[in-house]
Amino acid sequence: MSRNYDLKKVLSWAFYDWANSAFATTVMAGFFPIFFKQYWSTGTDIHMSTFYLGTANSIAGTVVAIMAPFLGFIADKGSAKKKFLFFFMMMGVVMTGSLSFLAKGQWTSAMMIYMFAYIGFAGGNIFYDSLIVSVAEKNRMDIVSSLGYSLGYLGGGILFALNVWMTLKPAFFGLASTGEAVRVSFVCVAIWWGVFSIPILLFVDEPNTGTGQGGIKSVLTGFQGLKASFNELRKHRVAFQFLIGYWLYIDGVDTIVLMAVDYGMSLGFDSTSLIKALLITQFVGFPAAIAFGKIGEKFGTKTGILIGISVYIVVAVWGFFMKHLFEFYVLAIVIGLVQGGVQSLSRSFFARLIPRESAGEFFGFYNMVGKFAAVLGPFLMGWTSIVTGSTRYSILSIILLFVSGGIILSLIRERSSDSLQYS
């Protein structure tokens, strides 16, 4: 590996994606929407359960969005990124495991626990993302970021496949029913997430760029410095402009991840087939994320992102007209080809625009706009479904986000791997 890498640190960092992607696949995209609609929300109108699920994602996203810049600032000042990562990881692990104890009809408790688990997942990502500057130089960030996403697809896909097998053949695993298999799956995710988080906590060094402040003093400093942080971000004009475009297009990406299974169920497709489609996305996404890293290095990071955005627009239109299950499988393959690429190249694109010593602070804003975007998308789909009385129209509502975000991104002109400007 080149001098721009420390293999042990890179893999330790990337394996956190392997760890927490189990939550993204098995819980967020897979079993929680199904269990929520068919078990915890039993007897509830199908459109209302979609609205409840979208609302839960939106509220959790709002909490993370509000916290993100503040947490990033105090983590930088106290050189505490790994401490915050550990805290949010443990929150996610404990809350995910707790889902297994909920009884039928307890949709309000399921929403609350899921929201805390989501906050742990998303909050941890603030500090995981910011640590990329500790393991890769600017000219290698595309491939390192893509490695993280590819391992996330693979690790999340492996555990998800095992969990699906458990639900299809519960007796083989000594389980009484499919419902019990889903409960055990939540526990499996919690254990997987916790165990595979160990390498990043042990082997990734955090540069001491802070002031050494801790405790109450760092919190007070954080409140005082948040405005200064925003002003500093605005001075980095291209980074600020990029975040506006990112806020819009990543909303569409996240919304499809969060709401795909719910959308498919609303169209009448059976849950087992939808789970199989998610597995297809995971395993296609593993090599595709690596391929997008190479596209970013060869043709430009922005070009790679715009390719992905264009594909997502086609997916949304196709989703509106979709009638047959095989089309859902085809869309799963198409999404798998671009999803990780858009996410990983966006992260590396932003990482090249910001000062290394303020990575936590700037990635706080990065995650803030991403989560505020995820507030709009799921709620927009749920609201559109209620207003129109048709779930199909809800998928079209996110096209506006892809188009507007892509236009803003296209105005950023890449001059070199380290120099970008607005045209």
Image (cartoon, grey):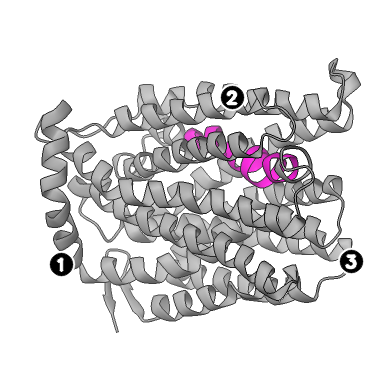
Q: Position of residue 362 (x, y in %)?
A: 26, 53
Q: Residue at x 55, y 71 (%)?
A: 309
Q: Which residues are magenta?
A: 15-35
State the SS at label 3: loop
Where on the picture, by quarter, is residue 346?
bottom left
Where on the picture, by quarter, is residue 360?
top left
State the SS at label 2: helix
Q: Residue at x 71, y 64 (%)?
A: 334
**Residue 285 badge:** none
- The tag earlier along the polypeptide, 2 or 3, is 2
Question: Could you tell me the amino acid type at mark 3?
Answer: His
Q: Position of residue 152 (x, y in %)?
A: 57, 41
Q: Position of residue 194 (x, y in %)?
A: 51, 23
Query: For mark 3, what is the residue?
Result: 324
Q: Is residue 205 left or right of residue 245?
A: left
Q: 336 or 36, which lies in front?
A: 36
Q: Is residue 268 left or right of residue 283?
A: right
Please name which of the two marks, 3 or 1, marks the residue nearer to the observer.
Answer: 3
Query: For mark 2, what is the residue?
Result: 98
Q: CA distance from mark 1 to mark 2?
A: 44 Å
Reply above or below: 353 against 121.
below
Query: For mark 1, what is the residue?
Result: 235
Q: CA distance from mark 3 to mark 1?
A: 50 Å
